[in-house]
């Protein structure tokens, strides 16, 4: 009987130890469940933030693409204007060259006219002198 009582006491002690271990395990499981719920909540929040960042990034990229397209259109316009200005400059250079050529021709003709006037004046003086001698 004493042996049975000792075995019973031993089993009750083991049962109490197992119950304590079960309670500890249950507390740890509850803590792990709480931690898991927190991690799942954090994961959901991160997914929400990443999604919002993705939407914002796409909007920024779209805006930047539109800005680049606008700048490319402006650049095309400026290139067209530059070509037009280069063409006008070319025409102006040609006109200046023609005007310079005309100016040189007029100078030559003016010089010849002045020589002819001087020759006419000499001839007129000669005729006047000859008439005056008669």
Image (cartoon, rainbow, N blue to C red):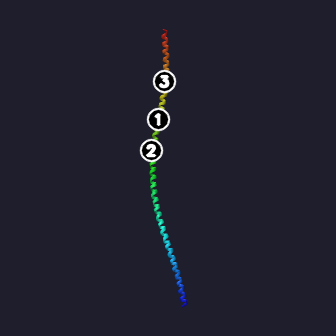
Q: Identify which residue, 47 or 125, lies in the foreground.
A: 47
The tag earlier along the polypeptide, 3 or 2, is 2
Question: Which residue is drawn at the image coordinates 45% and 60% (left, top)?
Answer: 52
Q: Is residue 44 above or below residue 25?
A: above
Residue 32 placement (x, y as % from top left): 50, 72
Instruction: Find the distance from the CA under tag 3 to the CA under tag 2.
Output: 48 Å
Residue 37 placement (x, y as % from top left): 47, 69
Question: Which residue is drawn at the image coordinates 48% and 29% (left, top)?
Answer: 101
Residue 35 placement (x, y as % from top left): 50, 70
Badge 2 marks a residue whose secondary structure is: helix
Question: Which residue is drawn at the image coordinates 54% and 88% (left, top)?
Answer: 5
Dot 1, crowdedness within 10 Å: few (<14), some or many (≥20)? few
Q: Which residue is mark 1?
A: 92
Question: Which residue is drawn at the image coordinates 50% and 75% (left, top)?
Answer: 27
* Residue found at the far top of this picture: 134
Dot 2, crowdedness within 10 Å: few (<14), some or many (≥20)? few
Instruction: Find the distance from the CA under tag 2 to the CA under tag 1.
Output: 22 Å
Q: Which residue is mark 3?
A: 110
* Residue found at the far bottom of this picture: 1
Q: Identify which residue, 115 or 39, lies in the foreground.
A: 39
Q: Which residue is mark 2?
A: 77
């Amino acid at each position: 009987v004493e042996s049975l009582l000792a075995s019973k006491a031993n089993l009750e002690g083991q049962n109490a130890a197992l119950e304590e271990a079960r309670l500890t395990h249950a507390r740890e499981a509850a803590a792990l469940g709480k931690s898991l719920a927190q991690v799942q909540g954090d994961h959901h929040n991160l997914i929400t933030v990443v999604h919002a960042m993705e939407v914002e990034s796409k909007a920024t990229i779209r805006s930047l693409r539109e800005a680049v397209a606008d700048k490319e259109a402006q650049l095309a316009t400026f290139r067209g204007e530059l070509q037009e200005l280069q063409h006008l400059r070319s025409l102006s250079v040609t006109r200046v060259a023609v005007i310079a050529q005309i100016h040189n021709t007029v100078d030559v003709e003016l010089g010849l006219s002045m020589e002819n006037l001087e020759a006419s004046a000499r001839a007129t003086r000669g005729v006047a002198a000859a008439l005056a001698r008669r």
